[in-house]
Image: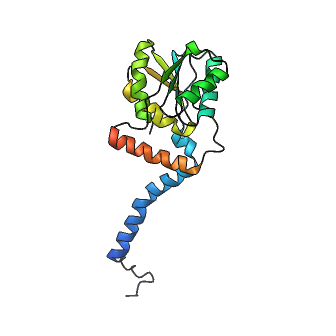
Amino acid sequence: MFASSNPARPKPSRLRRIVRLLCWSLAGPLTLVLAGLCFPHWFLQVETRAERADVIVILGGEPVVRVDRAVQLFRAGIAPKIIVSGQGDCSENIRQLLDAGVPRSAIVAERTSRSTLENARNCSSLFVDLNAKRVVIVTSWYHSRRALACFEHTSPDLQILSLPSRSRDATPRHFILNEYLKLGYYAVEHGVWPVGL
């Protein structure tokens, strides 16, 4: 008998098999993290179609871009009322709306919210007062998925639309990283799961 020209390969050591298994198990999550950092608008931005609604809600934070978007939607006739929600910059947002020509009678203030979930909870009673059935949320693009999830969580009987600001150029990277962490925190701590993920 002739010796085989292709001798059997030695089996990989147990340690090598464990390392290989760990590498493959980390490849998926690492790929998702890299994709999330490279293409954050795919993961964080939710923009629904623009439809006529009963009220527009501006969430606090980044006042200029959010107010500009709300004014644009108000002038387009999307909704006759604007709720300005958030403790920190409510007064400034109202001033900007008035300066842009939005009548005071069209503005409703919600001044107590300190988080996105509080925005949603505190606005839910205002939706009842306004007899709202369809609501448009205006926030920054990277905040839109979590904001939509919060409002759908607290007002499941309403149709919630997301029409965020569109500026993506100057968004600091730490805002985006922070948003991913908050998505996870809201899911675990509050049971508010990201819409569409």
What residue sits 54% from the left and 46% below the top? 175
Q: Position of residue 62 (x, y in %)?
A: 58, 37
Q: Position of residue 58 (x, y in %)?
A: 54, 27
From where the camera sits, is residue 91 visible? Answer: yes
Judging from the image, the colouring scheme is rainbow
In terms of depth relative to the viewer, which is nearer, 105 or 16? 105
Task: Classify residue 77 by image quadrant.
Answer: top right
In terms of depth relative to the viewer, which is nearer, 68 or 197? 68
In terms of depth relative to the viewer, which is nearer, 89 or 72? 89
What residue sits 34% from the left and 75% below the top? 15
From where the camera sits, is residue 163 visible? Answer: no
Task: Classify residue 104 by image quadrant.
Answer: top right
Query: Up-down: is 36 above or below 65?
Result: below
* Quadrant the N terminus occupies: bottom left
Query: Up-down: is 162 above or below 189?
Result: above
Q: Position of residue 157 (x, y in %)?
A: 38, 19
What residue sits 61% from the left and 25% below the top? 95
Count of numbered tags = 0
Query: Up-down: is 154 above or below 192?
Result: above
Task: Classify residue 11 by image quadrant.
Answer: bottom left
* Quadrant the C terminus occupies: top left
Q: Does 17 sit left or right of 54 as displayed? A: left
Q: Position of residue 124 (x, y in %)?
A: 40, 22
Q: Does 190 sit left or right of 147 as displayed? A: left
